[in-house]
Amino acid sequence: MMSSIIIQRGAARVAARQNTNIPRVLMRCTFASSDLSHNKTRGTKSDFIISRPTTASNNASNNATPTTFATLATASEAVEHPHDSTAFTAPQSKINFSDSVSAHGSKTTPEILRAIAVFKACRLPFLVKHAEGLLDVSTKVLGGTVTNTLVKHTFFRHFCAGEDSADMKPVIDRLEQNNIGPILDYAAESEGSEDDATSGSHEGIFTQPPFNQPARVYDYKSEQDCDHHVEIFKNCIRSVRDVSPTHGFAALKVTALGNPALLERISTMIVEVKNLFSKFDEKGLGLLSRDDFVRCYEHYFHTDDEKLTEIMDLLDPGNTGMIDYIAFAEMFTPYTLPTFTLKCKDVGPLALATPSDDEIVLMKAMSERLHTLAKEAVNCGTKLLIDAEHNKYQPAIDNLVLELQHKYNAKDRTQRPFIFNTYQCYLKDCPERVLTDLKRSERFSFHFAAKLVRGAYMVHERERAKKLNIPSPIHDTAENTHRCYNEMIELLLRHRSQHGPGLEIMIATHNKDSVEKAVNLMSELNLGPGDESVHFAQLYGMSDNLTFTLGNHGYNAFKYLPYGEVQEVVPYLVRRAQENGDMLGNAGGEINLLKAELRKRYLSA
């Protein structure tokens, strides 16, 4: 009973934070910027605590899903949980994250001097803001070779592990000596453009979406590049196996394996499916009765009794009489949607989001590439971290990751997950996504695995929202993001404590407070430092005081190691500098620790 209450407490703290200025929905998981209130949570006889989905924008920038808490709460009575000012309270950490020897003792003196120079450069706002333009000027004046050489021996060497496996080996060996595992990340980035899929006429894969939409052309080169990237990621996975056969990770970007324009189109479709559920859910309960579903389905689609019986058997095979969003979304997939929208009574947003037959072929090719890599990872004993990307792509990425988790994280296949999805806690819909996917993992019997990050595309997301005149998907304040991040840690750690091994979480953050809170909560829950369910990670070249100290104290610590040829990695370096501008601008603590280590060496010489 007590363990059940512990889980309820973690779930309810997440659910209880409401913005009273937002139209109220039952138990919707949002984090308010002000005016937080107390709320009650109530389970039904089937032990569900439900939130009604809010209608998403037709743009994928607002892709929150309806939330169910069935795996997190078991009581059927209302429970009130008072608001507290932090995500969780635990004893003060006994680990010293301010020890210069622990953080930088393994570095050579030239490496320390380079690190100080790089951090000081990153504290110059003008340099960070105009980095891309300055590099372009340097390339025109000095030439590409000289510019790349300068970048390689400064910023690249500090933030990246190397250009290839041989170049990375000394870095990985040093990390392993400090009980730090590698996360290899091929850092070339693809942003996509309107030229990737356009109504123009050029050589490529011609598609004609239904309902008289403009034709689209996906160029062959994009598909050929994606096939080439599969081999690059395979090499990455094998490299992890070779250097860290028992506990290594490989990171991959889905935009390297499929046309970004196609991902955006799939995402729009997924958002419109969510919007359709909201239209069906007229009572705002997050659940549909069979009668409600039939009435709404007949309102929007041409159908007959035989077809409706077939649909109901798919949606409610246990004949519970109720349908939730998870079942609804399982039926309306990117692959099956055309069979439904062809029966639409009117051409609306969902019908217009319907993919063409050729687009479905391209989607399946993307899925096959991911399955190829997942199989390789399982065979190599390497875990895959699927990176989060721009929010306009994220619903499609989530859908593909869930497809992989169903198969490769299946509980009847493995005791541990191989596929991790990434959740960006600066997004307002993050708690709903985490809780819904956790519920999915229980329903479909696969291991839930999550990497938690604060977010890496804040500038892009806010500028895009402003340009499209839509609400920003990002939390309004940094405090709300911190709160969201810490509460997701608490929720998942308590779930791990309640249900035992299986669920895994990677706490990927440079925030010392979040790390200390996680360490303290692990102690409170009797999860040892080496518990295989909990991992910590920081970017290479940043927050070594966290990573090396955690590794030295027996925690599962990792460094995210970007690699690739210098000219390919430059966009990554620029984005990291800009997105982490505030943190790098306040890198005085990092510099002080580096200087402290230099002083110790000078005094002991």
Image (cartoon, rainbow, N blue to C red):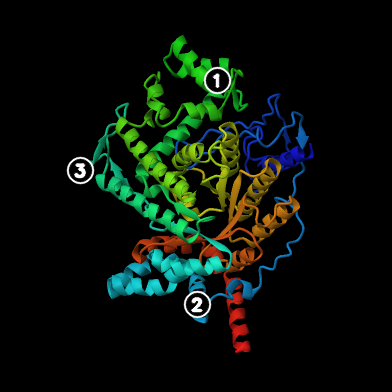
Judging by the rendered image, the residue that carries numbered circle 3 is 203
Q: Position of residue 190 (x, y in %)?
A: 37, 53
Please state which of the two labelled residues, at mark 3 or mark 1, is closer to the viewer.
1
Q: What residue type is labelled 3?
A: Glu
Left-right relation of 384 to 263: right
Q: Is mark 2 on a helix, strand or loop?
A: helix
| C-alpha distance separating marks 3 and 1 | 46 Å
Circles 3 and 1: CB atoms closer than 8 Å: no
Q: Residue at x 28, y 47 (%)?
A: 224
Quote the CA–CA distance across marks 2 and 3: 49 Å
Q: List x then y, in percent, for residue 540.
A: 51, 65
Q: What residue type is labelled 1?
A: Pro
Q: Mark 2 points at which residue?
A: 111
| Total count of labels | 3
- Of residue 136 and residue 244, the one placed in the foreground of this image is 244
* Pointer 1 residue: 317
Q: Distance between the residues labelled 1 and 2?
A: 61 Å
> Which mark is drawn over residue 104?
none
| Above or below, comparing residue 597 to residue 367 in the picture | below
